[in-house]
Image (spheres, helix red, strand yellow):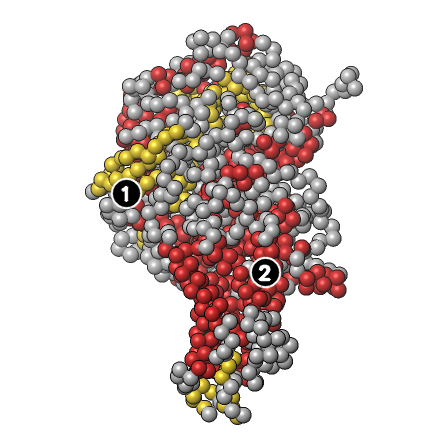
């Protein structure tokens, strides 16, 4: 084993995570003149953002000019079941178009409309066609564009200083294991190069977390190995708080067959473009699962639903385009009722709905993926799909405008999936790509401003570095310890079976008990081999992050006694307006255990709540809140923003 | 990416890191040698046949039906038999001089610099590389960066020449519809016309042609007609390899047919006249 | 349900290594990457292998399977015979790190040398107008997932290490082509750059890059050959030259396009940052502090005002002095030193 030599660097801003949010934040910090480091757990440009297929939601109104930020805001709140941090949803809806247009100046090539603008497509939960897209590889386009923008900034620096890395540098295949503090202020980050196992210490007064999600704690997931909740855990250990951790999005349509590709997503645009869901009896079952809240917008009959694809203005949309949690729950119910396929899914069929050519044109990579991975021809046979853990709505609690983490820590920022609040209890498809652009930029901007506000640079304490080294090397010193892969499988089983899509109090209590047992075992985990590119060791280090985050999820899920968005309790199947007032906030206590508390949700500003109709609000709000709403609505009832409410001619004319 | 710069032992002047120590030259288990072998045999045989024929100086013209083999078109030496020389006979009849001395070099150049044939002979003859992930047969490699291979860029000239030659071949095929002095039509005509059609398809499917017709544009939307032509050529271009082989076949067949009829080994199957 | 099959996997690092034999269970519908994961979970927990999405979208799990460059996640086990031995080796063209992981920094260095998109001057964000037919060609190249299989299989660098300095490889030819065909890109010297700095002349169009591309990008036909033809346009074609003289216009000649003054030289070979040449006067690599016998740092080392090595920028000032930044700088209090 090599000695514990530590490479050190000084930066102004360290961005942990090289996905969309991280790269966007880094660009902004660099544009603000800050020396910026980007930490990437895998190679540069391989981030999980590439998996996003549908598009990036932004109310540009290129396809339907009636679209604007207020409609987008309303859709987002509705999708999140009004649990969203309204300010984040507002900023997101307002700034998303600018962020998308900006990408074009970086070289992005979105699909175009006839008049040469960015084309926008329909997506579940969005009232108008709103998703800027490139075929079905929008995430790849986004990550490549940002990656190339960073390269272009490096080229500018090269022209000026003769060194590509002089102001922005990418540390690829590097993992951060610990944030180091000076009092309450962030002072640096400690981690290791995956390749060599050598340690590095980045001293920086501001750290931006952009590490993505937590899906790797689940058995069936669309997430890659990187999604071990590193950012969530780093934030907790640094004194920040997490909110909404009980809300996990299960993508309704992940592949369930063949087993080796279980979890891989079938993009929602398959449904947006005409794909329908059938159970094993061949019945198009989604019509039975339209919740009352959505009755007005969704078709009752197959005939009307089919007409919508060509004439969306005069017909209501097919129920296959319901928000994804509704679809996931419907599929789950069908499978539990014994009407699923042998592999535990339902059938998603486009083959009988469109000619083969149209399918391959509209869904090229979907076609390609099924053909190559599973030898299934989606133009000839239906796909077998089921719910898959896909996205965590919860995350680091942030100050909406600056993306700065709440809690006791200063100098910590979070953007993208690792931050919480923006999506409420459920995320709309397409909102994540725009989320990471909007808040990535804000995080970079505010982190840069924060470093300017500091009188002196926080210092890293020796003892902290030493203990970080000891913690990191511990698994290697227990060569005979428990196999990390076994532990991971056990954790995945606990989370998948007991804290999955449908939850019960008994199972959640059981899960918490098992997580405590796993904690003891993880303390004894060992890794065979040395420090050079040793995946066993890497996993052993990631496990403790996965455990903390899983504990948060399980605790919050047990606490929230209602069903809402990405959290479904069998014992409390209804949505409860009283619970809408509450965010569940996780923090770490001194012993390292998760501490949970309730925190009231910020109250929406008057002009924002007035964007909604009373009838709709009455499904979410308590009586008290409705009285308040009537009070602000009453005297100036006509002072609404015109054209913003659900257009009556569209939804009620039938 | 940049991290290697700071690794111990590897600096700007540090030692080069080695590749994986794998002893086997290639681990491919499929019959990767088959394709280059077929190319080698096919191209080799064709070149041998063509060389023999070009220097035979006989059996290239069927006077009665006006069949002229493409290998001798246009016939330009003093040796050219009556009726076969449409453009006069400016050249002397040295045996080393082919009858079509003005066209054959360009045709050869066209095919030698063709983007498909380059792939074929670089792989099959030059072993550079014989197949993907199979080691190059040469210790040093500079590609097409310097003399003589930089002249591969002359493909564009060769393409222009090939267009003219295709016109001559077309003319040959049209005037061959005769029997003595009146209209005639036989199996030889079908072969000649088929050959010319294939030659046109091969010539038009050329990468240079694809580039000239539209590939060089930056905005297709401003040139709708050229865009449509480009789309058509692009479709042909996908079949450039097949057309390259088909035309080798039709050329040899046409030539052989004309030779056989001319030598009297069998007579032309006549439909009219 | 599964059957045992025979696998041979190269294990080792830069010091050397060998192909080792394993018998692993294989189930219906699995891909090679699944087998590697099973090996990690059951027999060799420290077997190094890159992977991410496991769906052929990220291009991480590039390896050579039975001698052919492939993505591990896109190679179905059903494509092999029941009793066939499957041999898995790392990419040959790049320096090995460990087992199946190679140092692909060559590609990232070449990426940094390829001039980036040049936005059209005077067009505001949101005002970009492009037609679908115009963006489609470039979109094909933007499908690239950067798996670097084309770079690995290209014999120019695979068999001739010495060409690495002068040759950027197919991935960066399609990048050059993508930008050259981009309807709004403001640079027009990309063809010259591809020829002079990227070493496009080394390519002898033997099409192996196209053969191995998991995204089925027609690298040779749609990018390299058109770029070669565009070079021919400028340098060799008589008719195009004549046409330009007569009509005094050329699609490819923008009048306001910028020329490439700040092009970086292409010299890196993917092992170090040779491209930066160490020429930057204040550039020094960061250094590790001394460690004690027990492998820990000395306390004084960490408590020093300038801990460890120097900052990678050679300066210790914080924040960056305003004359060193090229972008918006927050208002700073007046400095007496000036």
In the current view of this chain or complex, which residue is farthest to the top?
C300
Q: CA distance from mark 2 to mark 1?
A: 45 Å
Between residues A74 and C101, which one lies in front from this camera angle? C101
Up-down relation of residue C262 to residue C245 (above or below): above
In this rendering, position of residue C41 left or right of residue B41: left
* Residue at 63% from the left image edge and 59% from the top image edge: B217
* Residue at 43% from the left image edge and 9% from the top image edge: C294
Which chain's residue wears label 2?
Answer: B
Measured from the top left, where is residue A590 in percent x and y?
42, 14
Q: Which mark is residue A252?
A: none
Residue A564 visible? The answer is no
Q: Secondary structure at mark 1?
A: loop
Which chain's residue wears label 1?
Answer: C
Between residues A420 and B205, which one lies in front from this camera angle? B205
Up-down relation of residue A224 to residue C228 (above or below): above
Up-down relation of residue A114 to residue C158 (above or below): below
Q: Which quarter of the image is occupied by the N terminus of chain A?
A: top left
Measured from the top left, where is residue A317 in percent x and y?
44, 55
Q: Secondary structure at mark 2?
A: helix
* Residue at 57% from the left image edge and 79% from the top image edge: B79
Measured from the top left, where is residue C3 in percent x and y?
22, 42
Between residues B73 and B203, which one lies in front from this camera angle? B73
Mark 1 closeness class: few <14, some 14–19, many ≥20 residues within 10 Å = some
In this rendering, position of residue A247 left or right of residue A608: left
| Residue C247 image-quadrant placement | bottom right
Q: Which mark is residue B155?
A: 2
Q: Which mark is residue C85?
A: 1
């Amino acid at each position: 084993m090599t000695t514990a030599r530590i490479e050190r660097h000084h930066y102004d801003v360290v961005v942990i995570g090289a996905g969309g949010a991280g790269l966007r934040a880094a660009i902004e910090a660099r544009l603000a003149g800050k020396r910026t480091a980007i930490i990437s757990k895998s190679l540069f440009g391989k981030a999980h953002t590439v998996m996003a297929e549908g598009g990036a939601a932004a109310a540009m109104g290129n396809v339907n000019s009636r679209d604007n930020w207020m409609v987008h805001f309303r859709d987002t709140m509705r999708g999140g079941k009004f649990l969203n941090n309204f300010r984040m949803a507002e900023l997101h809806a307002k700034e998303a178009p600018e962020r998308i247009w900006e990408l074009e100046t970086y070289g992005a090539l979105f699909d175009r409309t006839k008049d040469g603008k960015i084309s926008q497509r329909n997506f579940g939960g969005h009232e108008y066609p709103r998703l800027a897209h490139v075929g079905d590889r929008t995430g790849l386009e986004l990550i490549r564009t940002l990656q190339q923008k960073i390269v272009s900034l490096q080229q500018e620096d090269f022209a000026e200083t003769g060194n590509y890395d002089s102001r922005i540098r990418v540390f690829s295949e590097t993992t951060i294991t610990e944030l180091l503090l000076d009092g309450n202020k962030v002072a640096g980050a400690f981690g290791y190069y995956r390749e060599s196992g050598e340690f590095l210490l980045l001293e920086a007064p501001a750290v931006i977390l952009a590490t993505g999600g937590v899906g790797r704690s689940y058995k069936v997931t669309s997430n890659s190995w990187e999604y071990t909740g590193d950012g969530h855990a780093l934030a907790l250990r640094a004194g920040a708080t997490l909110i909404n951790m009980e809300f996990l999005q299960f993508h309704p349509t992940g592949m369930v067959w063949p087993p080796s590709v279980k979890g891989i997503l079938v993009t929602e645009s398959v449904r947006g473009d005409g794909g329908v869901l059938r159970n094993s009896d061949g019945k198009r079952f989604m019509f039975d699962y339209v919740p009352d809240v959505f009755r007005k917008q969704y078709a009752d009959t197959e005939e009307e639903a089919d007409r919508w694809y060509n004439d969306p203005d005069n017909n209501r949309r097919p129920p296959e385009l319901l928000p994804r949690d509704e679809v996931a729950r419907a599929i789950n119910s069908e499978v539990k009722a014994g009407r699923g396929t042998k592999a535990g899914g339902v059938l998603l069929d486009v083959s009988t709905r469109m000619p083969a050519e149209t399918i391959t044109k509209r869904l090229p990579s979907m076609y390609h993926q099924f053909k190559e991975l599973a030898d299934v021809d989606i133009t000839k046979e239906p796909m077998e799909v089921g719910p898959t853990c896909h996205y965590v709505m919860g995350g680091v609690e942030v100050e909406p405008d600056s993306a700065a983490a709440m809690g006791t820590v200063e100098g910590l920022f979070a953007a993208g999936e690792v931050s919480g609040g923006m999506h409420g209890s459920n995320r709309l498809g397409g909102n994540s790509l725009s989320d990471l652009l909007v808040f990535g930029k804000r995080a970079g901007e505010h982190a840069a401003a924060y470093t300017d506000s500091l009188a002196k640079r926080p210092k890293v304490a020796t003892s902290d570095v030493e203990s970080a080294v000891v913690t990191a090397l511990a698994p290697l010193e227990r060569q005979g310890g428990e196999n990390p892969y076994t532990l991971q499988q056990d954790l995945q089983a606990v989370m998948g079976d007991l804290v999955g899509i449908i939850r019960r109090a008994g199972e959640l209590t059981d899960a918490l008990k098992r997580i405590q047992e796993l904690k003891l075992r993880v303390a004894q985990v060992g890794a065979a081999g040395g420090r050079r590119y040793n995946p066993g060791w890497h996993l052993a280090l990631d496990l403790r992050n996965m455990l903390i985050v899983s504990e948060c999820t399980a605790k919050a899920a047990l606490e929230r006694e209602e069903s809402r968005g990405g959290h479904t309790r069998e014992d409390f199947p209804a949505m409860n307006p009283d619970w809408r007032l509450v965010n569940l906030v996780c923090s770490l206590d001194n012993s390292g255990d998760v501490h949970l508390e309730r925190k009231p949700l910020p109250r929406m500003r008057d002009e924002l709540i007035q964007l909604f109709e009373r009838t709709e609000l009455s499904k979410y709000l308590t009586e008290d809140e409705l009285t308040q709403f009537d009070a602000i609505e009453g005297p100036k009832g006509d002072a609404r923003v015109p054209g913003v409410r659900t257009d009556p001619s569209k939804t009620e004319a039938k | 990416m940049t991290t290697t710069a700071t690794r111990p032992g590897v600096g700007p002047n540090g030692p080069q890191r080695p590749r994986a120590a794998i002893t086997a030259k290639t681990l491919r288990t499929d019959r990767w040698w088959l394709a280059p072998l077929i190319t080698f045999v096919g191209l080799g045989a064709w070149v041998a046949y063509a060389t023999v024929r070009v220097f035979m100086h006989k059996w290239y013209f069927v006077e009665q039906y006006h069949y002229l083999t493409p290998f001798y078109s246009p016939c330009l030496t003093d040796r050219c038999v009556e009726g076969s020389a449409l453009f006069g006979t400016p050249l002397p009849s040295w045996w080393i001089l082919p009858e079509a001395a003005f066209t054959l070099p360009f045709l050869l150049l066209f095919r030698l610099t063709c983007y498909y044939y380059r792939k074929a002979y670089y792989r099959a003859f030059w072993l550079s590389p014989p197949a993907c992930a199979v080691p190059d047969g040469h210790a040093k490699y500079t590609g097409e960066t310097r003399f003589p291979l930089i002249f591969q860029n002359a493909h564009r000239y060769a393409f222009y020449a090939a267009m003219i030659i295709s016109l001559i071949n077309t003319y040959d095929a049209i005037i061959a519809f005769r029997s003595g002095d009146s209209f005639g039509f036989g199996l030889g005509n079908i072969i000649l016309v088929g050959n010319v059609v294939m030659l046109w398809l091969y010539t038009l499917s050329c990468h240079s042609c694809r580039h000239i017709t539209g590939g060089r544009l930056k905005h297709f939307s401003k040139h709708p007609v050229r865009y449509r032509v480009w789309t058509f050529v692009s479709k042909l271009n996908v079949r450039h390899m097949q057309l390259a082989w088909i035309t080798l076949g039709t050329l040899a067949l046409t030539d052989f047919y004309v030779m056989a009829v001319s030598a009297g080994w069998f007579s032309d199957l006549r439909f009219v006249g | 349900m599964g059957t045992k099959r025979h696998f041979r996997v190269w294990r080792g690092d830069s010091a050397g290594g060998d192909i080792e034999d394993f018998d692993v269970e294989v189930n219906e519908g699995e891909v090679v990457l699944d087998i590697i994961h099973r090996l990690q979970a059951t027999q060799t927990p420290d077997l190094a292998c890159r992977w991410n999405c496991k769906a052929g979208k990220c291009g991480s799990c590039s390896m050579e399977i039975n001698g052919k460059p492939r993505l591990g996640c896109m190679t179905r086990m059903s494509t092999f015979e029941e009793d066939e031995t499957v041999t898995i080796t790392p990419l040959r063209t790049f320096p090995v790190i460990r087992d199946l992981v190679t140092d692909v920094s060559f590609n990232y260095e070449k990426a940094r040398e390829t001039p980036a998109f040049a936005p059209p001057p005077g067009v505001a964000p949101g005002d970009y107008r492009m037609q679908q037919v115009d963006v489609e060609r470039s979109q094909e190249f933007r499908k690239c997932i950067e798996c670097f299989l084309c770079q690995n299989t290209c014999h120019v660098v695979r068999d001739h290490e010495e060409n690495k300095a002068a040759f950027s490889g197919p991935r960066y030819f399609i990048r050059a082509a993508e930008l050259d065909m981009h309807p709004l890109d403001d640079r027009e010297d990309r063809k010259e750059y591809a020829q002079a700095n990227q070493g496009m002349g080394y390519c002898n169009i033997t099409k192996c890059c196209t053969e191995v591309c998991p995204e089925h990008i027609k690298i040779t036909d749609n990018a390299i050959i058109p770029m070669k033809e565009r070079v021919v346009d400028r340098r060799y074609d008589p008719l195009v030259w004549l046409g330009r003289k007569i009509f005094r216009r050329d699609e490819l000649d923008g009048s306001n396009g910028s020329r490439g003054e700040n092009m970086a030289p292409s010299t890196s070979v993917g092992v170090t940052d040779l491209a930066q040449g160490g020429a930057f006067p204040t550039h020094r690599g960061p250094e590790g502090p001394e460690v004690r016998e027990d492998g820990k740092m000395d306390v004084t080392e960490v408590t020093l005002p300038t801990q460890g090595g120097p900052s990678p920028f050679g300066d210790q000032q914080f924040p960056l002095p305003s004359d060193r930044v090229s972008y918006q700088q927050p208002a700073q209090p007046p400095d007496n030193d000036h």
